[in-house]
Image: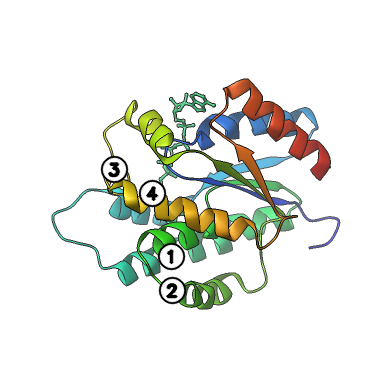
């Protein structure tokens, strides 16, 4: 990535951790600095990828095979990356993405038990060398996150999983963030929102 290119920031965490809430806070922060920003999400971010999202999140009687789920995540990602994210970065915009491949390591790897080597192979195929410049990982006690999530709309297919699933998701995230302490910045999302946002501001200031 050269100086005329934008930056790629991702925000990660388990259910109800406050990603949407804090994305709008980060948007205000970056726009104050006159940064041209694209906000997007995964799975989704293009019409086709949003259709795949619907397929993935809908509760259904047919059990979705884990590998099929994994491939659908990467199918949506390939479309999103090549038609939305990369063109925006090349045009000098900053991209703020609600979830990216770390979610796949956490949910399909940790949660579903698929191997990280398999995920790595798909990651290389779809992303080549591309990695986010900064990943904010919002960490929360699983029960607290689920309590927050359950206050909103009806639970989707992932949110309806058992608590053990989300404990494995969190463990996978916590393992992953240790692999690159520069890219991953861990925020304690169990705190009051003002404190969470003070920590996010601190991370963004260091990033600049
Ligand atoms: N998925 C995704 C995979 O399995 N593999 C993949 O590769 C990818 C990309 C997508 C699902 O897909 C799975 C993971 C997911 O299950 P999603 O919509 O992105 O779904 O994920 P959710 O976690 O469900 O996202 P939500 O938008 O539903 O939750 P948020 O954005 O984390 O939480 P938010 O901001 O809506 O906050 C939840 C509630 O908590 C309050 C908010 O006001 C809100 O009511 N809140 C706080 N309350 C107290 N203190 C704080 N600090 C608070 N922060 C927020």
Neighbour tally class for label 3: few under 14, some 14-19, many 20 plus, Cα within 10 Å: some
> Assess mark 3: CB under 8 A from ligand 1?
yes
Label 1: which secondary element? helix
On-image quarter of the N terminus:
bottom right
Q: Earlier in the sequence, mark 4 or mark 1?
A: 1
Say which of marks 2 and 3 sits in front: 2
User: Which is more N-terminal, label 3 or label 4?
Assistant: 3
Q: Earlier in the sequence, mark 4 or mark 2?
A: 2
Foreground: disc 4 or disc 3: 4
Q: Are marks 2 and 1 in contact (CB under 8 Å)?
A: yes
Query: Residue at horizontal 32%, vertical 46%?
Result: 163
Which residue in the structure is indicated by mark 3? 156
Tag 2 secondary structure:
loop
Q: Where residue 5 sits in the image (x, y, percent)?
A: 78, 56
Residue ID for mark 4: 166
Q: Element type at marker 4?
A: helix
Q: Quadrant of the C terminus?
A: top right
71 to the left or right of 94: left
Q: Quadrant of residue 62?
A: bottom left
Residue at 63 percent of width and 21 percent of height: 194
Residue topped by disc 1: 109
Q: Is residue 188 left or right of residue 153?
A: right
Find residue 115 and name its label: 2
User: Which of pointers 3 and 1 lies earlier in the amino acid sequence?
Assistant: 1
Q: Are marks 3 and 1 in contact (CB under 8 Å)?
A: no
Callouts 4 and 3 close, C-beta under 8 Å: no
Mark-to-mark CA distance, 3 and 1: 19 Å
Q: Earlier in the sequence, mark 2 or mark 3?
A: 2
Dot placed on the residue nearer the N-terminal end, 2 or 1: 1
Q: Residue furthest right?
A: 3
The image position of residue 91, as x and y in percent, is 73, 53
């Amino acid at each position: 990535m050269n100086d005329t290119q934008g930056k790629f920031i991702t925000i990660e965490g388990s259910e109800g951790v406050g990603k949407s809430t804090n994305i709008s806070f980060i948007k205000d922060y970056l726009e104050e600095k006159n940064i041209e920003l694209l906000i997007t999400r995964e799975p989704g971010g293009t019409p086709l990828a949003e259709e795949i999202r619907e397929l993935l999140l809908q509760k259904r009687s047919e059990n979705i095979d884990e590998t099929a789920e994994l491939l659908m995540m990467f199918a949506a990602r390939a479309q999103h990356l090549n038609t939305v994210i990369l063109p925006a970065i090349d045009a000098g915009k900053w991209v703020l993405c609600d979830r990216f491949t770390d979610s796949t390591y956490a949910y399909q790897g940790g949660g579903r038990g698929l191997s990280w080597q398999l995920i790595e192979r798909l990651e290389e195929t779809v992303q080549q060398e591309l990695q986010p410049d900064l990943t904010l990982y919002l960490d929360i006690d699983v029960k607290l996150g689920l309590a927050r999530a359950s206050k909103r709309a009806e639970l989707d297919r992932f949110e309806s999983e058992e608590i053990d699933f989300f404990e494995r998701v969190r463990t996978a995230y916590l393992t992953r963030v240790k692999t690159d302490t520069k890219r991953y910045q861990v925020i304690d999302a169990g705190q009051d929102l003002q404190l969470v946002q003070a920590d996010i501001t601190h991370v963004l200031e260091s990033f600049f």
